[in-house]
Image (cartoon, grey):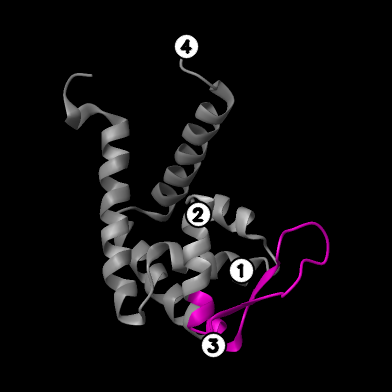
Amino acid sequence: MGDLDLSVGYALKKAAAALRAAMDAGLRPLGLSVPQYACLELLGRRPGMSSAELARGAFVTRQSMHAVLLGLEERGLLARAAAAPQGRALPTRLTDAGRDILAEASGIVAAIERRMVAGLSADGQERLLADLAMCTAALDEGGAAA
């Protein structure tokens, strides 16, 4: 692998770890974890998502998402249907309290992201997004390593 300072993967992992730590610290006063915030954010954008869809969107296992949903439901931040309208998936939606805490959490996370990219120009930020999207697409399309 060589020099870690020259490894793109290592640099990405360091950036992801720093972002996660900043988000953990920022969301802690609201009593939210990063997966809980991700769940609220996803439901704010697409009400009615199933647990499996939320797990994929938040990058956690189904089992972890089950615990996240239970915790949020106990706090009155989301509601799930008692019975599935079709199949087995129970659609989930935010409550008014869930929308309120999401608005506050989204502001915190947006400020953290602004701080993270503050050293980049607007063009640099656009380029970073495009480059990360290309990296993701290359791995999604590539399958197993050649």
Q: Is residue 69 magenta?
A: no
User: Horizontally, is 45 left or right of 109 in the view?
Assistant: right
143 vs 39: above or below: above
Looking at the rendering, the stretch of residues picked out in magenta corresponds to: 72-99
Disc with the residue nearer the chain's start (4 vs 1): 1
56 left or right of 145 in image: right
Q: Residue at x 26, y 60 (%)?
A: 21
Q: Nearer the viewer, residue 133 or 94?
A: 94
Q: Earlier in the sequence, mark 2 or mark 1?
A: 1
Is the residue under label 1 in contact with that under label 2 (CB below 8 Å)?
A: no
**Where is residue 104 shown, x and y percent of the image?**
44, 81
The question of residue 82 being in magenta is answered with yes
Is residue 38 visible in the rendered image? The answer is: no
Q: Which residue is mark 3?
A: 97
Q: Is residue 129 above or below residue 111?
A: above
Residue identified by numbered label 1: 43
Q: Are marks 4 and 1 in contact (CB under 8 Å)?
A: no
Q: Nearer the viewer, mark 3 or mark 2?
A: 2
Instruction: Report which residue position mark 2 lands on.
Output: 63
Answer whether labels 3 and 4 touch (C-beta < 8 Å). no
Q: Secondary structure at mark 3?
A: helix
Q: Residues within 10 Å of mark 3 (few under 14, many from 20)?
A: few
* Comes first in the chain, label 3 or label 4: 3
The numbered disc on residue 146 is: 4
Identified at 54% across, 22% down, the residue is: 143
Depth order, front residue of 43/86: 86
Instruction: Inspect the image, locate mark 2, and give the three-letter code of the amino acid beneath it.
Output: Gln
Q: Is residue 102 above or below residue 12?
A: below
Q: Residue 97 at x, y = what percent? A: 54, 88
